[in-house]
Image (cartoon, rainbow, N blue to C red):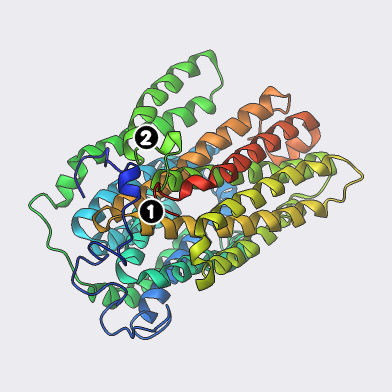
């Protein structure tokens, strides 16, 4: 890959043939395409000889990240109260988000220059170190710093895992690997909150953070031999970490992270003076994002740019809608917070089902249609949620709708990862994987922010208020309708643009 962060990934690049059909293969022309790692039988599946250790390691890492993500939401309020840091509560989340944005772009550059081994294990180590810092923090300020270190590690890990998939697995197995990513989230999402709550109650909130780093040792031991067996590319003269950090792409990533943090700060301080950090944040964020994402992303150019755009639309619409579902059920239908949260559980299970469906070999020829269908399912699910504003509609309608939305996301997200690797040149796999993750993160912050603004504008009050307070203070159906109608429209737009996922000149 060229060091130019603009990356020239326009329609011509997106239309490049997949590595398995033409051009260099994902491991640097050292093996025939579709051969897999040394010792792998040609017909082996992802758990066959030669792939088993690597697949188990990947699943273990993703499961740990998923468990941490679901557990931290339970432990964070307890930690903030214990550290007398309620005023910095939101920054416990935003610190992770902003540093991960920077790390995602850095990981793309680092992977393309040196391969995935060092960035991946650096990320795992950073993720564990951040957990230790947060778990041992004597003050909320240091806790937030630990969350920032976690974000750096998490951003490095997720991008590097995509590159590992592109280099270690033949194209025919990548859909199954992407399905394993989603499957690895199922159990942690179900048991994470319950386990974290029990640990926080009986042992203390610190052990929610301090226990996870110990579990990292297992995937490290399992993955290392398999990763070392992959052919390596010799680093160029500018392939060191210092050169990566000084690269233009890394500086642009830093601008994105700083801009996102300023926008979040302004959103949490709704005063006339907040316009200053908001303007500064936009000035940093917008130009940098346009250079970091594939050229043509914001005009829905065919092929790779459209894959990246659709992932951002899907992730943002889902998270924005999901953020308001518990509040709607608590404030408008009188459910407990526990029951309201359980209404979302089915979506996690069907997400894994959708990811499994897209991994079937017969679906390979219809991958673009699967992404479009996933967006359509998501649009229907989001549009169905505000029906429960009517007392005549049973509250379990939300749970049913969210199982459909989860299935759609499984089709969309996993297919997007497969398409990205298919449309990426081997030397650009790291940067393009980083773009995909950045699109997810940016979609979240933009559409969640838009949802919050709509909620307030239509009289709903602050979406950041505690659920108990919101239940007694909020009864504005129009505010919920505005949020869900907008996010359903975003998902429908993605479904309508699905035809542009196929590069120009292909059938």
Tag nearer the camera, 1 or 2: 2
Residue 476: percent from the left, percent from the top? 79, 29
The picture quadrant where one finds residue 111 is: bottom left
Within 10 Å of the Cα at label 2, are there few (<14), some (14-19), or many (20+) other Cα atoms? some
Mark 1–mark 2 contact, CB under 8 Å?
no
Between 278 and 352, which is closer to the camera in this rendering?
A: 352
Determine the CA span between mark 1 and mark 2. 26 Å
Question: Taking the image as drawn, is residue 70 in sight?
Answer: no
Q: Residue at x 41, y 40 (%)?
A: 98
Q: Residue at x 60, y 61 (%)?
A: 351
Within 10 Å of the Cα at label 1, are there few (<14), some (14-19), or many (20+) other Cα atoms? many
State which tag comes first along the sequence, 1 or 2.
1
Question: Taking the image as drawn, is residue 455 in sight?
Answer: yes
Between 161 and 130, which is closer to the camera in this rendering?
A: 161
Element type where label 2 sits in the image: helix
Position of residue 410 relative to residue 100, above or below, is: below
Q: Residue at x 50, y 40 (%)?
A: 443
Residue 134 left/right relative to 12: right
Between 38 and 134, which is closer to the camera in this rendering?
A: 38
- Name the residue beneath numbered marker 1: 130
- Name the residue beneath numbered marker 2: 289
Residue 57: assigned label: none
So how many labels did they put on this image? 2
């Amino acid at each position: 890959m060229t060091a130019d962060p603009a990356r020239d990934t326009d329609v011509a690049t997106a239309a490049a043939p997949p590595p398995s059909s033409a051009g260099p293969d994902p491991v640097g022309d050292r093996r025939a395409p579709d051969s897999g790692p040394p010792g792998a039988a040609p017909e082996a599946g992802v758990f066959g000889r030669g792939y088993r250790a690597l697949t188990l390691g990947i699943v273990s890492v993703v499961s740990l990240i998923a468990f941490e993500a679901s557990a931290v939401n339970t432990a964070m309020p307890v930690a903030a109260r214990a550290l007398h840091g309620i005023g910095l509560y939101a920054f416990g989340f935003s610190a992770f988000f902003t540093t991960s944005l920077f790390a995602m772009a850095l990981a793309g550059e680092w992977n393309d220059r040196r391969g995935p081994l060092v960035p991946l294990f650096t990320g795992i180590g950073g993720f564990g170190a951040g957990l230790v810092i947060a778990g041992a923090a004597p003050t909320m300020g240091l806790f937030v710093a630990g969350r920032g270190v976690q974000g750096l590690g998490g951003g490095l890990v997720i991008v590097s895992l995509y590159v590992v998939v592109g280099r270690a697995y033949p194209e025919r197995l990548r859909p199954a690997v992407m399905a394993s990513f989603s499957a690895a989230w199922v159990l942690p999402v179900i048991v994470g909150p319950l386990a974290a709550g029990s640990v926080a109650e009986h042992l203390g909130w610190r052990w929610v953070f301090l226990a996870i780093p110990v579990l990292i040792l297992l995937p490290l031991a399992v993955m290392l031999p398999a990763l070392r067996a992959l052919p390596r590319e010799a680093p160029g003269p500018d392939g060191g970490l210092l050169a990566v950090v000084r690269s233009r792409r890394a500086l642009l990533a830093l601008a994105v992270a700083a801009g996102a943090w300023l926008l979040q700060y302004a959103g949490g301080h709704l005063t006339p003076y907040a316009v200053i950090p908001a303007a500064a944040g936009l000035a940093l964020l917008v130009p940098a994002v346009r250079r970091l994402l594939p050229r043509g992303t914001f005009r829905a150019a065919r092929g790779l740019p459209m894959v990246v755009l659709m992932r951002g639309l899907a992730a943002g619409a889902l998270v924005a809608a999901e953020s308001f579902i518990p509040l709607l059920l608590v404030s408008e239908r009188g459910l407990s917070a526990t029951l309201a949260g359980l209404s979302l559980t089915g979506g996690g299970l069907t997400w894994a089902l959708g990811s499994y469906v897209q991994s079937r070999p017969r679906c390979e020829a219809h991958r673009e249609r699967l992404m479009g269908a996933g967006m359509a399912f998501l649009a229907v699910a989001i549009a169905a949620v505000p029906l429960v504003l009517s007392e005549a509609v049973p509250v379990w309608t939300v749970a049913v709708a969210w199982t459909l939305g989860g299935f759609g996301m499984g089709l969309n997200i996993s297919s997007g990862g497969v398409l990205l690797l298919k449309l990426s040149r081997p030397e650009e796999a790291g940067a393009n994987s980083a773009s995909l993750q950045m699109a997810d993160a940016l979609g979240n912050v933009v559409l969640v922010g838009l949802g919050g603004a709509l909620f307030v504008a239509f009289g709903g009050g602050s979406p950041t208020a505690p659920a108990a307070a919101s239940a007694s203070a909020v009864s504005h159906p129009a505010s919920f309708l505005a949020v869900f109608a907008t996010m359903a429209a975003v998902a429908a737009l993605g479904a309508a643009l699905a035809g542009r996922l196929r590069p120009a000149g292909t059938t």
